[in-house]
Image: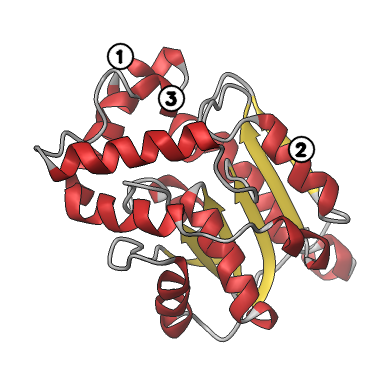
Amino acid sequence: MPLGRLRAKEILIVTDRLPLLLLPGLSCDQRLWRDQARDLSDIAEPTLPDLTLDDSLSAMARRVLDAAPRRFALAALSMGGYVAFEILRQQPERVTRLALVDTSAALDSPQRVTQRMAGIQSLKHGRFFGVTTRMLPQLVHTKHVHGPIGEEVQAMARRVGGDAFLRQQNAILNRPDSRPLLPSIKIPTLVAVGDSDVLTPPGDAEDMHRQIAGSTYHVFPECGHLPPMELPEQTSQLLRRWLLE
């Protein structure tokens, strides 16, 4: 059919790319969302903020907001989700849609707090080893522990370094409970999680999904805590649908 005879609704033309902020997790840098920034560049203008410079979520959120476009879509993983909630507390009118990936609105359990404090104390009295092979099963699916994905996760943590790790852990330990915020979220929201995530398991994601009216829920199969790296194509496709819905 000649182009001139196509109905308008049959032609999709992206005239303006959508501002998109991609927030990383603890000990993560721009590598985390690298593939999605590339894959979505035809419809979005991705920005990958640095969350390594501050020791509180409020300061992280202010730094992100100061550099962000007037309005933007916001995708966040793990600690990045905690920052996303803080952005919604500070300037909710600037966020057009929200994707919460492998994160939680709840506070840490006492056991998790103890683990974080032990990590902080060990670093204060010794070298920073980043993500060890023993820790990798908490971050990625077992099939990625020995291989290029596991190696990239370890390299990423080494690049972020020990000083940033301490600042980020302090921010996480002092974060507020974000569960009361969830019912107030009215923008299009995606909640996604790896089926094998042991740090922020599917139950946490289901709780958020239930509390955010109209949200979409997705589970990544055979995936741990880091879908953007473990399943990059699936993650990009999911975010594309979220951006265009």
Q: Earlier in the sequence, mark 1 or mark 2?
A: 1
| 143 vs 118: above or below | above
Crowding near the residue tagged with mark 1, few <14, some 14–19, many ≥20 C-alpha atoms within 10 Å: few
| 229 vs 80: above or below | above
Closer-to-camera residue (156/169): 169
Q: Secondary structure at mark 3?
A: helix
Residue shown at 26%/19% (left/top)? 133
Mark on residue 206?
Answer: 2
What amino acid does circle 3 point to? Gln
What amino acid does circle 1 point to? His
Residue shown at 68%/31% (left/top)? 202
Crowding near the residue tagged with mark 3, few <14, some 14–19, many ≥20 C-alpha atoms within 10 Å: some
Residue shown at 70%/65% (left/top)? 97
What amino acid does circle 2 point to? Glu
Q: Secondary structure at mark 1?
A: loop
Q: Earlier in the sequence, mark 3 or mark 2?
A: 3
Could you say where residue 60 lies in the image, as x and y percent from the top left?
41, 70
Q: Which residue is under mark 3?
A: 138
Label 3, label 2: how far apart the Cα atoms are: 20 Å
Q: Which residue is under mark 1?
A: 146
Quadrant of residue 139 within the rendered picture? top left
Asked whether the viewer can see residue 177, the reply is yes
Horizontal arrangement in the rendering, residue 225 relative to residue 88 (left or right): left
* Front tag of 3 and 1: 3
Could you say where residue 121 lies in the image, as x and y percent from the top left?
23, 41
